[in-house]
Structures are given as structure tokens and as C-alpha cells.
Image (cartoon, rainbow, N blue to C red):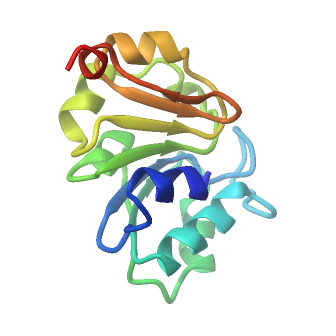
Amino acid sequence: LFQKISHYFNGDLNGRRVAVWGLAFKPGTDDIREAPSLTLLSQLFEAGAIVQAYDPMAMQNVRRYFSDSAQLDLKNAKEAALEEAHVLVILTEWSEFLKPDFSAIKASLHQPIIFDGRNIYDPNTVSDYGLQYCGIGRGLTVAADYASA
């Protein structure tokens, strides 16, 4: 997933704000052992990105794990993680992420794209809201308003 995000920004993630929804290994737990979020966040930090993250249960564990990182900004709500973010990354399929307000997501992001690490969204639905979509094994789906430009 990091390679897809980095490629989207032509390798320049320095200072980019990446909203991340989901930090736990799986929904319903605060367990972050072997969670994909640990690797991705480390890669984003190394590339100079700022991560604005939200998870319903795992934020305390992530805060402890990355206690020395000034690039991690944990938010108290999924909407707050979107504020001033360039892109959105989905890493855990929590039920509260399954039916988001795609219009609000598009309005919040500097770059209208969702990187879906769990393939929880239908690319066509996301595209209908004017967002680009990049899922695992799916490639990039260009939003309808980008395709006509």
C-alpha cells in the first residue's frame, strides 16, 4: 500500500498529511501486534508524511508504540482525521467505516482519493462521488469527473 501512495505523489510524501482510518489488527480489538498499520505508518514517517489517524479502540496502543514520533496525530473521530489531509487510507474494516459520507470525504481531502487496504468499498460507488479509488489488487479507479476532464 505504501508503494501505491508514494507512486501517487511521485515519491514525494514530505509534509503530506495522510488520514488513516483503522489501526488495529482487526475490528473489535485494540490489538496492534502484526497490524499492517505499524509497517505503513513507519514507512510514511520515514518518507516525511504526517499521519492523522483514528481507530475506535487501538489508539492508546499505537500512541505507546510510536511514542517518539512527532509525525503522528491521533484524532478522536474519523471525521477529524480527514481535516487538512491529502488522502485517506483504510487499514481496518471497522463497521463505522463501512458506509461513510463520501461527499464529506471528498470535500475534506486535498487530493480526492481513497487507498483502501481492506477493499471494503465498491470502486464504482466511490467514483460516483468524484473520488479516485485504489484498492488492493484493484489498481486505480478514476472518478467520473476526472475521466471527463
Q: Position of residue 130 (x, y in %)?
A: 28, 19
Q: Is residue 89 above or below residue 103?
A: below
Question: Which residue is at 37% across, 68% downward?
Answer: 12
* Residue 9 occupies quadrant: bottom left
Question: Which residue is at 31% across, 13% downward?
Answer: 144
Residue extending farthest to the bottom is: 68
Q: Is residue 90 left or right of residue 118?
A: left
Q: Is residue 144 above or below residue 134?
A: above
Question: Which residue is at 56% across, 79% downward?
Answer: 66
Q: Position of residue 65 (x, y in %)?
A: 63, 78
Q: Is residue 76 above or below residue 49?
A: above
Question: Which residue is at 66% across, 34% downward?
Answer: 118
Q: Is residue 40 left or right of residue 112?
A: right
Q: Toward the viewer: 86 or 7?
A: 7
Q: Is residue 34 left or right of residue 135?
A: right
Q: Is residue 104 left or right of residue 20?
A: left
Q: Is residue 15 above or below residue 147?
A: below
Quarter of the picture containing the C terminus is top left
Q: Position of residue 96 (x, y in %)?
A: 51, 28
Q: Position of residue 89 (x, y in %)?
A: 49, 45
* Residue 100 occupies quadrant: top left
Q: Toward the viewer: 92 or 12?
A: 12
